[in-house]
Amino acid sequence: MLSTQHINRAIQWFFAGLATLGQGMRLAAVCLHQAAADWYRQDFPLIGYLFKYLLAAFLALWVALKMEMDQPATALLTVVIVMHFRSGMVITKSYYRLIGTVIGILFSMLLVAWFAQDRFPFFIAAALWIGMCTAGSLVYRNFQSYGFVLAGYTLCIVGLPATLTPWHTFQIASTRMSEIGVGLLSATLVSELVLPQRLWENIQAVVRSKFRDFSVLLGTGAPAGLNQPFLKFMQDIYQLEAFRSSAQFETDDARVHSATINRLNVQFMAVSTTYVVLQRLIQRLQTRVASKEADALQVLMQPLSAAVLIDGQPASHAEAITRVQQAVAAFQHDFDARLAVQLQHLMIHPEVNQLEVETGGELLSRLAKELTDYLDTYALLVAQPRARKVASREFTADQLHMHIDWLPVSIAATRGALTLLILAAIWMTIDWPSGILAMTLGVITSTLFAASPAPMATIRQFSVGVLLGIVLVYISNVFWLTAAHDYVMLCIVITPAVLLTAWLSARPATTLVGAGLGIAYFLMVGFNQALGDNPVKYFNDSIALMVALVVSGIMFSLTDYAASPWAKARVFTQLRKLVVDACLHASMTAPIFEMRTRDLIQRSGSVHRPQEAESVRVVEALCAALELGHAVLALRAVARGVLAQPYQLVQRTLTLVASYYKQPGLAQQQAVLQWLDHFLAWLQGGEYADALLPSQARKLTTQLHFIRLVIAAEVLQDQALTPTGADS
């Protein structure tokens, strides 16, 4: 018989086992929940995107077949081109594709009406049109640029086939417009109605990420180099602007907060630039062994650095942001007293130049003011992200001004026109049946990749996709289309190509490969008016695509402006010219100067290659230009309220600085420095008493001293703004 002790022990073991099993089940449930959450966050969006991509393609194919369109593949090609993860992107791409297509069709009909009987003037006019559209794609940003691309190669889709049968021009134009419209409508409906992904979520994420990164940078102090965070901030600014412009068609939230986001971008430019300028001043003082001045500025800055962090972390909700705003306001209120205390402490050190500390204090005061403005706008977005009315905070924000260098624009326009003419010459010379296809792809690549910072690498990736598309078309035409006798079988045939295109396009590293695959496949796939395989047409079309890529690649290699050394030197020259404009043109404001300098660097492609030594030099030049440009504009602002004599002295200063930046050289640099020394001596000698108020004299002194520091530092940096060949 079992004793009571044995029974109790068995019961204890049983309940202990149940407890262990319960803990294991709870742990397994937690793990499964975490795995499911990770899958939903990381993998489900991709699966949903593939499903939507496939559904939009099937819908476009069904409508095109029901309407008995000549080329259902054109509707599928349109779906491939406009589909995107985010609904706002799809709507925006569809909107600008529709505009570009309509304009391209109208111009095609006009050309055919004028030159239907003579190909030579037709192709001259077509080349001029392609050149204009290529130039427009470079001048404008985002999907406005895409609209110009569409207006360009729509001429090839509609105008070139119409030259063979001019009497069918209107029919061809209306049919292509209908097919493209079916594709646009299918992609838009599916993107909006099936698992919609909103751009507004991306906008909020970018805004919060930018605020968090800057708060950490300001709160923990500058790293050894400011180039990486500065480039990251620039990328965030232009990414946010791209999202903002694309979200206009999406939700009420995006439309309501459009002006807020725009203003937030402009204010972030200002505050990040001032922070970088202040840190460069501190680093410059440290390299000159002016450690006491640098230490004093760091002591002054420490309360502001502590104010932007809550318990060592960036503010993440409305209440925390309010605390940060209050702390920054308190810093501003006490700053003048803190600065006076620091200057009093430094008086016991005769070797200390107090003007260095006053200059840094002026920058720090500006940083606090700009940070206050930025926090006020950021709080509006965080505290009321779903606000429906903005009447109480309506404002206008400066648009993101562009800096357009017409030389690369002209080169790209000439390249696009020549690409069309070369392929047209081949077509007319040998009467090539697939010449129109070659010209179409040649124009697509020359216009679509004109703004690429590395066009040859872009062409190579796109070519890989085209080769994959050619192989997949062969398999589809020979082995699958012969068995496709109804709509369901046709959907099965195109499914591998659609899924592979969608999957490659969803990954940033292979987006161009996916684009090449989708474009090549649906340009060549063997179902339009009839199903089946035509080997002669297949090989002609394959050769046409390869010839187009070769011609386009050669033209890009011969006119690769971004990769040429003289183009890089031109970037430095353009930066100097912007500083000259800030000195000489009273219409130049700080926001305009800021945006144009950043846009110049953004278009140069340096932000896409942050690790390269050349990019580091470009960012150094950008920071130096921003330093001097903002100092010049601040000096001009102070001079507006002074009397004639000091105003003339300021104008003389601006003229000399402009002359030095227009034609840099040691003699011009020494002339500027000597004049600045003379002007500063006049201010510090007290001779200004009858012409200036003490506050005006102090502001003039700090700005002039800062300009002198920046110009003099170019000697220490081996004239970083003037690389070899910059003046050529």
Image (spheres, rainbow, N blue to C red):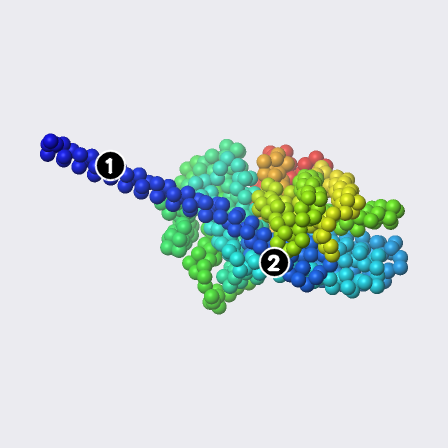
- The secondary structure type at the circle numbered 2 is helix
Residue 193 in sight: yes
Q: Give the Cα separation between the discs numbered 1 and 2.
A: 57 Å
* Mark 2 Cα-neighbour bin, 10 Å: few <14, some 14–19, many ≥20: many
Q: Position of residue 243 (x, y in %)?
A: 56, 54
Using residue 70 as the reference point, say whether residue 307 is left or right of it: left
* Mark 1 Cα-neighbour bin, 10 Å: few <14, some 14–19, many ≥20: few
Q: Position of residue 130 (x, y in %)?
A: 77, 53
Q: Position of residue 99 (x, y in %)?
A: 68, 61
* Residue visible at 31% across and 42% down in the picture: 26
- The secondary structure type at the circle numbered 1 is helix
**What residue is pinned by disc 1?**
17
Residue closest to the eye, 689 or 541? 541
Q: Amino acid at mark 2?
A: Leu
* Residue visible at 84% across and 63% down in the picture: 167
Residue 498 in sight: no
**What residue is pinned by disc 2?**
59
Total count of labels: 2
